[in-house]
Amino acid sequence: MSEPEIRADQLTGLPTILAPGRSDRPLDFHSSARKPGAEESCPFCEGREDSTPPEVWADRPGGGDPDTPGWRMRAVPNLYPALGGEDRDAGDPADGAAAADAGAAEAESTAVGSSLRDPLRASARGAEPDMFSARPAHGTHEVIVHCPEHRTSLGELDEAELSSVVAGWRERMAIHAPESPYVQLIVNEGGGAGASLEHTHAQLYALPFVPVLVARERERFTAYHERTMGGNLLADIASEEVRRSERLVAIDEDAMLICPWASRGAFELRLIPRRPAPSFERDGSDAAPMLATALRALREHFGAAPELNLWIRTAPRGADQFHWHLDIAPKLAHKAGFELSTGVDINIYPPERAAAELRAALG
């Protein structure tokens, strides 16, 4: 590929401009290396449990009391939450109010979706338009600490530890999924990727609405299923990626790793389970080995673990036609005026080239 192309992401329909002629510009590579002195004051390290809000969940193989050492993973409310609302036990949503909470969340999701997306809708009824509509941001925002030792990236965990992390993600998402229209799990690694603390951790948002990008993906899955009389959009994309092989990085019994067709940034990766499953939190496939492969490929190619963003796209509540996937976006460039003004990303590194280089890095 030598000339610029416009490609549309098959899952969202959003366009990306691939501009390989600009790849001679240096990539703004930063590693998620440790900062001097950070470990001595890290509130996520074992033994400093009193530095965080009281835990709502922990994986303690040997048992033990909450907020004490002896854990393998633990989840705590975010000290500076993006979401708020009624304070309830996130570890036990199956109380008498759970059904009412779910109904309220659904109603609020509908309200947010209608009033905030179209503040002028009232004009259709002859009433005054409400151009400054707002709703309380109810929901849950928690931190999942991946390990008791001070490590700065998921890539520092061995495969057994990574398997525990993936299981912990599933457990926390499954707790919130019944009462939330959408549950988003993300990992930010490195200051340039948005991490305020370097100790590896995830953030979970139990949202009172379905984000627009997720809703677009849900609608495209549903439309494709109907148009093809039963097809699964991502499963069919995955089959074609294996056949073409030019963007395929790795594959095993449970999952495959590709650089997506319309990658929004250089070396973007997508982990896809080989057996279609709508919800990550209810799927039993083992994603940890392929996640370890993805992190190793990036580390080997760049010589160190790059700063990155990772997220899991799972089915919104009530969506039958979907296929979860895990995306990794190394933080190698910054969005500038064009991207911010148009919402269209420019990727200077075609996914075919990125995939070839990552395959070579894996040997």
Image (cartoon, rainbow, N blue to C red):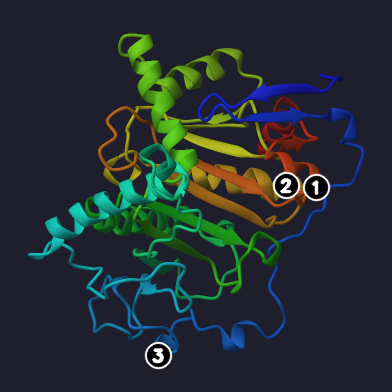
Q: Nearer the viewer, residue 283 or 61?
A: 283
Q: Mark 2 points at which residue?
A: 340
User: Residue 310 at what x, y percent from top left?
Assistant: 55, 51
Q: Nearer the viewer, mark 1 or mark 3?
A: 1
Q: In which quarter of the image is residue 91?
A: bottom left
Whether residue 254 is situated above or below residue 153 in the rendered picture: above
Q: Name the residue under label 1.
A: 337
User: What is the three-letter code of the residue carrying label 3?
Assistant: Asp
Picture residue at 45% right of the left edge, 88% below the top: 51
Q: Is mark 2 on a helix, strand or loop?
A: helix
The answer to the question of whether label 2 and label 1 lie on touching residues, with beta carbons closer than 8 A, is yes
Q: Name the residue under label 3.
A: 50
Q: Dot 3 surroundings within 10 Å: few (below 14), some, or many (20 or more)?
A: few
First-in-chain label (3 vs 2): 3
Give the Cα distance between marks 1 and 3. Answer: 43 Å
Whether residue 228 is situated above or below residue 35 in the rendered picture: above
The answer to the question of whether label 1 and label 3 lie on touching residues, with beta carbons closer than 8 A, is no
